[in-house]
């Protein structure tokens, strides 16, 4: 298992074409009046993670954290640089991603499992544990659209974590639910660490980051400010926040 990036960069092209018609865009393009801008959402990020590493990614809003996770997940193709991911990956990037609101909680659990490549036999064996961990035993036959966002997040987290991924990607998902459920999530994350999985984790909670992670990556406006030991990088980041 391994996740490695080398000088990774992701560029978006933005411009004013969204505010004009297609005809006007063509005319402006012909006359050289159309202007587009480059936005480097991630620019020059390099790190290496091996078995058992738990990486916390910190930075203010708009620093490129979620974009980086989407690249590692295979959703976005890098513009430049090297990206190598070796291992069975499960990504939890959105609370409702991969769910169907008209299907029941049980049906959605099996649907998510199928999307992740698991057999029905495996899901039959894992289902009770998933529902029990998510604390949704009384809501198995409810349409998912009737559940709260916190319930959906608990279900998504339970599916992701209870099927033993080799690489787990979490984007702001440990902040959902009440204090008791968050504590249970942290205990489960420690089990995942002990089982040797590689985890990439975005959170605005510095206490969670310090408690769970052995490495931290700090991004600012897409650029890598620091990567390394948790205490050292968190201290640098906290000093940066105090000056803002």
Image (cartoon, rainbow, N blue to C red):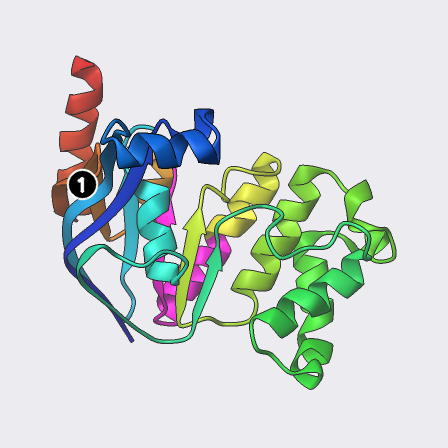
**Nearer to us in this view, 213 or 16:** 16
Position of residue 13 measured from the top left corner of the image (x, y, whole percent): 29, 40
Examine the rendering and report whether any part of residue 73 can be seen: yes
Q: Residue at x 22, y 36 (%)?
A: 38
Residue of label 1:
231
Relative to 96, say whether 106 is above or below. Answer: below
Task: Report whether 111 appears left or right of 36.
Answer: right
Residue 49 visible within the image? no
Among the 4 quarters of the image, the one containing residue 197: bottom left
Depth check: 177 or 75 in front?
Answer: 75
- Quadrant placement of the N terminus: bottom left
Q: Residue at x 27, y 62 (%)?
A: 53
- Residue at the image point whose x is 22% and y is 21% from the top: 241
> Which quadrant holds residue 122?
bottom right
Helix, strand or loop at disc 1? helix
Q: Give the range drawn in magenta.
A: 187-204
Figure check: 223 above or below 188: above
């Amino acid at each position: 298992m391994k996740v490695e990036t080398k000088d990774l960069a992701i560029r978006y092209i933005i411009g004013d074409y969204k505010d004009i018609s297609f005809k006007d865009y063509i005319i402006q393009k012909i006359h050289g009046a159309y202007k587009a801008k480059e936005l480097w959402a991630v620019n020059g990020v390099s790190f290496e993670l091996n078995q058992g590493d738990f990486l916390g990614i910190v930075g203010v809003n708009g620093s490129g954290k979620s974009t980086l996770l989407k690249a590692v997940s295979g959703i976005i193709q890098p513009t430049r640089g090297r990206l190598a991911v070796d291992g069975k990956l499960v990504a939890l990037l959105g609370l409702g991603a991969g769910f169907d609101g008209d299907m029941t909680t049980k049906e959605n659990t099996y649907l998510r499992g199928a999307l992740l490549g698991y057999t029905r036999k495996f899901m039959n064996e894992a289902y009770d544990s998933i529902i029990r961990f998510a604390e949704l035993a009384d809501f198995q036959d409810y349409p998912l659209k009737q559940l709260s966002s916190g319930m959906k997040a608990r279900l998504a987290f339970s599916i992701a974590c209870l099927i033993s991924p080799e690489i787990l990607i979490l984007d702001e998902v440990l902040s959902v639910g009440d204090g008791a459920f968050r504590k249970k999530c942290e205990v489960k994350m420690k089990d995942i660490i002990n089982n040797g999985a590689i985890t990439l984790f975005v959170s605005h909670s510095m206490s969670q980051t310090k408690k769970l992670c052995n490495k931290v990556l700090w991004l600012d406006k897409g650029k890598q400010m620091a990567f390394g030991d948790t205490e050292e990088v968190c201290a640098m980041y906290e000093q940066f926040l105090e000056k803002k």
